[in-house]
Amino acid sequence: MSVAEYFSSMEYGPAPEADQPVREWLARHGEGFGHFIGGAWRAPAAGTFFDVIAPATGETLARVAQGDAADVEAAVAAARAAQPAWHALGGPGRARHLYALARMVQRHSRLFAVLEALDNGKPIRETRDIDVPLVARHFLHHAGWAQLQESEFSEWAPLGVIGQIVPWNFPLLMLAWKIAPAIALGNCVVLKPAEYTPLTALLFAELAQRAGLPDGVLNILTGDGRTGAALVDHRGVDKIAFTGSTEVGRQIRAATAGSGKSLTLELGGKSPFIVFDDADLDSAVEGVVDAIWFNQGQVCCAGSRLLVQEGVEAQFIEKLKRRMATLRVGHSLDKGIDMAAIVDPVQLARIESLVETGRAEGCTIWQPREVALPERGSFYPPTLVTDVAPASTLAQEEIFGPVLAAMSFRTPEEAVALANNTRYGLAASIWSETIGRALDIAPRLACGVVWVNATNLFDAAVGFGGYRESGYGREGGREGVYEYLKPQAWSKLPLRTPRRADEAGHVDDGSRIERIDRTAKLFIGGKQVRPDSGYSRAVLTPGGELVGEVGDGNRKDVRDAVAAARAAGKWSQASAHGRAQVLYYLAENLAARADEFTRQLARRAGVVALDAQREVDAAIGRLFSYAAWADKFDGAVHAPPLRGVALAMHEPVGVIGIACPDEAPLLAFVSLVAPALALGNRVVVLPSEACPLMATDFYQVVETSDVPAGALNIVTGSRSALLPALVKHDDVDAVWSFGRADESTLVERESVGNLKRTFVDYGRQIDWFDRSSEGLPFLRQATQIKNIWIPYGD
Ligand code: NAI
């Protein structure tokens, strides 16, 4: 159309952003991009390249290297070589570099924004106004953490070399989320961008070097999933930080099991967008636009499930359809469009096929007739799906496209039940003009981020990350910083020598049984119960003397214990004050029986009385410490750059399975159980196999201390039978395993089912008496942080 025709029709004309500077930069690398390793471009070892396509037009933008194991080797070596000097530079020295990176991003903001829009296919309006400013903010914020590292994290050390794998939906922003905290705290990085969208990472590396970032601190390795898998497998990597699909997250968990690598996973979601009948419906409609049509719905925390209260459902759907008809879909460099291209024809086909599945299942699919799609490129219209059953594919599967599945609810209880009816737990939006209602619902949602009367807000100061199968770990904020550190004391711990299989937990040989008058039972649901098997196990001192018997628990007992823990949800909802009191009682009641515990411990563990007394005293002290912590480990209020706050609430993880080591059988037991209980978790404990009687004696203390039934459950028996049952149980949210390296591996490997959180010692010899065996490292593991955003005003 001519300009005159646009004037007469009042149609929007195109408002294209110039792309000349980007084209020039691409032309300079016309022969193909190598990897960026040790501060230099490096051709791929195997000489293989692949094309990078602009989704909005289908044109080839560039050729980039396909990395293999040899390239991974070179990149990890460069990072390893650079790390000591980078760490030695100190926090303030590194802070300068991060400030410089933030300013570099600002100086080249348009170049980044245009390149990102071309490479990913998303609207320039979003890359210019959201992605790139957030990238600069992220480096700026983390420059501050580098500056404060020595005072704020003095007992923590960097991990070393970090392998980072990012997806294609926010290529540059995800790079910033990954790199900024890692390098701020003294680590060096090998980052693999997604194969669809590697270009802004390469531009970033080039400009970072020009901004003076030392060689080897940041290495970019391009390639597909095979390159990612090679990075995951490399022995020289200390941590993998991954964002992407839940399926690949599972593979990475399995691949790193037992390797000692730290792991954080930011995975998929199916986030609810809940509209109550007292919501400002027009604002909520705009919220939906931002929730599911931002970035074409290719957002892990997209509000892809609309839950509307029945009374306003018809009105809301009507308003929403009207708004959808005004959305404009077009080329990513057109400044006047709302939605642009889907990242790749493969993703487009996936969206189409999922929507067809929904149609076949009886859902009603609605797409506005008014919205025209460009003729070339990968595009999909804004789509509303109604008549959706809660169990249907479109209500359960992550579509990762501009498709909204709508359902209704009657009561707040039903809203919570529907919202939580998913294996994911990334984010949620709540729309209500009654703040009390919104803040009543927010803690009941099983997810890591909640936006009240808002959606898709992000900030470097506010942690982001999921519950359940949306993964674990946080990015952003203080909590994100800890993900790139380890307790200093732990890194120096020796590995314990593997224990012989026959060293502990002897099975009853029958001959000495008459000398035992009492067999300790299991402790499940607040009651002493006999083991399902009907068998007992003899317990011997290290010298071979028979000191008692314990129940020989089996899988059924583990299941009963988990069911009891699940049912004890009240403990998680109890006030922190109430939990503190219970822990004080435990401490006092143990103190009252200290002499008896000391005598028993000395005999059973074969230690001198003085050592036993020291252990009992330490256990009492630890209980008092966690009683103190119970009402003090209490979150934060963040001040992101908007009119409002984000509440970082500490919530219990849920049901934690705990496998205790043999050393310090009473103190280690208390050191693991107390922080979990203090923060509101319910626990199923497998005590030391060699010396389980200290734990079974402890339940007598529990019985007199107001610990509610089911909050603490103890199952004795063969560890090799009980631990796998515990780790494979889908109602267990986390497993902590201390004692043996092979058990750490087992726990990590078997945790993939429901992606439970794991906390293991990899066979390190922990000094349970030391101060480092108490406090923050344990409290963090006992907590998940939910960030609730509450903007103010009209
Ligand atoms: P993906 O999970 O396969 O890719 C993400 C990153 O992981 C890419 O860099 C990829 O090269 C890498 N990767 C793939 N296989 C790997 C392996 N075995 N080891 C290490 N790294 C590996 O995601 P994909 O295939 O691009 O998208 C498929 C679906 O995943 C989407 O439709 C969407 O549902 C979901 N997804 C979710 C994301 C999120 O942020 N939650 C981001 C991207 C995709």
Image: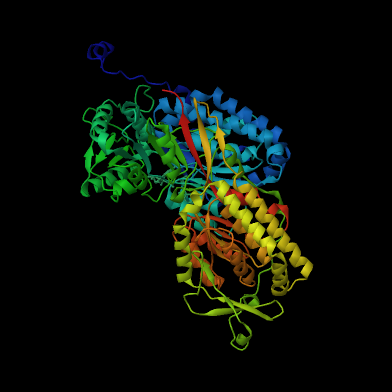
How many numbered markers are drawn?
A: 0
Q: Is residue 562 above or below residue 3?
A: below
Task: Let me know if residue 73 appears in the view.
Answer: no
Q: Residue at x 55, y 42 (%)?
A: 191
The colour scheme applied to this rendered structure is: rainbow
Pick the quarter of the image with the C terminus: top left
Q: Residue at x 58, y 44 (%)?
A: 190
Pick the quarter of the image with the N terminus: top left
| Residue 54 percent coordinates (x, y) | 39, 34
In the rendered structure, the answer to whether residue 452 lies left or right of residue 157 reads left
In the rendered structure, the answer to whether residue 162 lies left or right of residue 349 reads right
In the rendered structure, the answer to whether residue 288 lies left or right of residue 33 reads left
Q: Is residue 193 above or below residue 610?
A: above
Q: Residue at x 42, y 32 (%)?
A: 435
Q: Nearer the viewer, residue 739 or 527?
A: 527
| Residue 215 percent coordinates (x, y) | 65, 37
Q: Nearer the viewer, residue 183 or 490?
A: 490
> In which image quadrant can residue 150 be found?
top right
Task: Let me know if residue 372 appears in the view.
Answer: yes
| Residue 198 percent coordinates (x, y) | 48, 38
| Residue 494 percent coordinates (x, y) | 71, 60
Q: Is residue 479 above or below residue 761?
A: above
Q: Nearer the viewer, residue 429 or 12?
A: 429
